[in-house]
Amino acid sequence: MNSAWLIHAPQGYGKWPLLQRAAAALLCESPQSPAAAAAEASRLPSALTAYRACGRCASCALLAAGTHPDFLVAAPEALWPELGLNLAEESSARPDAKTAASQDIRIEQIRRLNDWAVSTSHRGRAKVALVYPLDALNPAAANALLKTLEEPPEDVQFLLGAHRIDAVLPTLRSRCRLVALPRPSTVEAQGQLAQIGAARAKEAVLAWSQGAVYQSNPAAGLEWAEGLIDALAQQPSREVSSSVLPPPPDQKVGVATLLKIGSDLQRVLAGGAPLYLPQKAQALAALAGRTSLLRLAKALRSWTTRQRLAGFPLNQALASDALLLEFAQLFSRGD
Ligand SMILES: [Zn+2]
C-alpha cells in the first residue's frame, strides 16, 4: 500500500499550508466536503483536497493546541518559528538547548517518528506524519525514514514536502506518490498577498516573487533591488563605487536579490524583457549596456556559490561589502 504523498515545488508555492490542511482533514472527526473546492483543488489530486477539517471536533482542537497525539511533525528546528510550530513542546527533544537551532532534520527526529509510527493510534483513527522539507534530511536521517516507508504501518499516512525533487533519495522517492505542486495562479497569488498585507504595489511583488507568494516575505529584497539599480544608474561608468550603494538587508536576501537582478540583466542582454523587475526595464537596459553576458555569467556563478554558503555564520558586514563590490564591478569599465 502506498501511504506516502510527496508534494514538491519551489519554495514559496504553498506546500506547507497545503500539507497542514491535508493533515488536519485526515485527522478530523467530521471532515467537510466544501461545495466550492478552493483554488488548490484544481492544482492537486482530490485525495488531498476533497475534504476540509471541521475546526470544531476534538481532533481539530487537539491539533490547534499542538497536542494531537496522532500527529507528528519532523522539520528543522531553525524553521519552527516560520512554520508556526510550538518550540516549547519540542525543546525537550533537543540535546542541548544552547546549541544553535538545526538547519537539518536530525536523525533523532526520524527515530522518534519511527517509534511513534508503530505505536497504537490514540484516537483510534488515522495517524499523520508530516516531514518537511525532505531537502533538509541528511543521508542518515533519509535512510532511517526509508526503513519506515518501506514497510509503512497500516494506519499511518505520511505527508512529505520537498523543494527540489532531485535532492530526494531516489529509493525514498519511489515509495511515494509524487505530486508536483504548480505555481499558484495570479488570482491565488493576489489573494495570498492581500492576506499577508503586502505593503507594496501588488503587481511589482507578483513579478518579483514569480508566484512564490507563500514565503514569509515575498517582497524581500525588492526595495533594495530598486534602490541599487537607481543608485548605479546615477553613477558614471568610468568609476563605479560600491560605497554609495545601499547595503543589503541581510546576506541571504542580498544574494537572492542579486541573482534575480543578474538573471534579468541576462534576459535584457539576450533581447528579452525583465521578469522580476519589469518596472525597471529602462534602467536595466541602460545597465545591461555597460556589462556583458560573459561578466554576468561569472558574477552569477559567484553569487550561486555564496547562496550555498549563506546559511553559515560569517561576518555580515564583510560579506555585504564583497557582494556590493562584485555587483558594482559588473558595470565599471576596463574590468
Ligand atoms: Zn474536525
Image (spheres, rainbow, N blue to C red):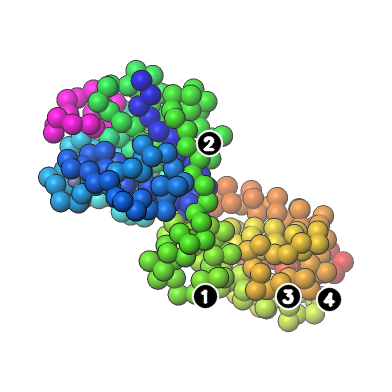
- Point out which mark residue 201 bears: 1
Q: Are marks 2 and 1 in contact (CB under 8 Å)?
A: no
Residue on which disc 2 sits: 165
Residue on which disc 4 sits: 238
Please tell me whether mark 4 sits on a helix, a strand or a loop.
loop
Mark 4 vs ligand 1: CB below 8 Å: no
Instruction: Give me the residue at 47% from left, 65% from top.
Output: 190
Q: Nearer the viewer, residue 79 or 21?
A: 21
Distance from disc 1 to disc 4, alpha carbons, whole Å, reads: 35 Å
Q: Which of 27 and 151 is in front in this view?
A: 27
Residue 212 vs 58, above or below: the answer is below
Residue at the limit of the structure toward the right, as seen here: 334
Residue on which disc 3 sits: 283
Instruction: Give me the residue at 42% from left, 64% from top.
Output: 191
Distance from disc 2 to disc 1, alpha carbons, whole Å, reads: 33 Å
Mark 2 vs ligand 1: CB below 8 Å: no
Q: Nearer the viewer, mark 1 or mark 4?
A: 1
Q: In which quarter of the image is residue 285?
A: bottom right
Q: How many marks?
A: 4
